[in-house]
Image: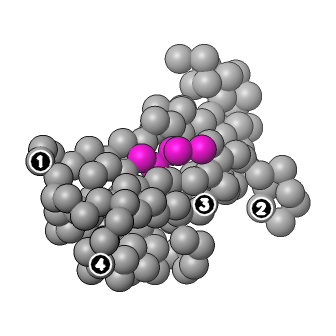
Amino acid sequence: MDGDHSAEGVRRDIECILAYTPMVPLCIVMHDSFNPECREGLRAANWEANPHVQFVELDFTAGQVSTQPESADQRWGGLALAMMTPEKRTGPLRITGRADRTIHYLDRSILAFKRGNRKRALREWLK
């Protein structure tokens, strides 16, 4: 899935899929999960409403910080993965983001660097 990159658009796109009851196992792969707007939409979607969703991993593959001039220092790429099955889940739904901690320190480091505080940027990254 790679559509609207606004948080609201991502949430809406996902919730359209969540109205579906799968007949066979279904993998939902979502692009740009490393982007802040997209990630916000991924988290805001009502995954719990569909009992066939077994898990959601926001960082199935890693994204990167762009070096392109038009998107320098922006987070793009990455793939999220959700699994739906014909069987209903039996336990709580797990929504995980293995890169959450990395994103937290990366964003703080980039912010410090942009403010001209290179020493603080390095400290934030090394925490």
| Residue contact at pointers 4 and 2, CB within 8 angstroms | no
Which residue type does callout 3 highlight? Asp
Which one is in front in this view, the residue at disc 2 or the one at disc 3?
Answer: 3
Eyeballing the image, is 23 above or below 126? below
| 3 or 4: tag closer to the N-terminus | 4
Disc 2: which residue: 71
| 2 or 1: tag closer to the N-terminus | 2
| 2 or 3: tag closer to the N-terminus | 3
| Residue 44 in sight here | no
**Residue 111, image x, y percentages:** 62, 43
| 3 or 1: tag closer to the N-terminus | 3
| Residue 79 in sight here | yes
Eyeballing the image, is 9 above or below 91? below
| 1 or 4: tag closer to the N-terminus | 4
**Residue 41, image x, y percentages:** 41, 67
Q: Residue at x 37, y 77 (%)?
A: 17
Q: In the displayed structure, does residue 117 sit left or right of residue 18?
A: right
Q: Can residue 59 be found in the magenta stretch?
A: yes
Disc 4: which residue: 20
Q: In this orientation, which residue lies closer to the viewer: 99 or 125?
A: 99
Which one is in front in this view, the residue at disc 4 or the one at disc 2?
Answer: 4
| Residue contact at pointers 2 and 3, CB within 8 angstroms | no
Disc 1: which residue: 90
Q: Quadrant of residue 19?
A: bottom left
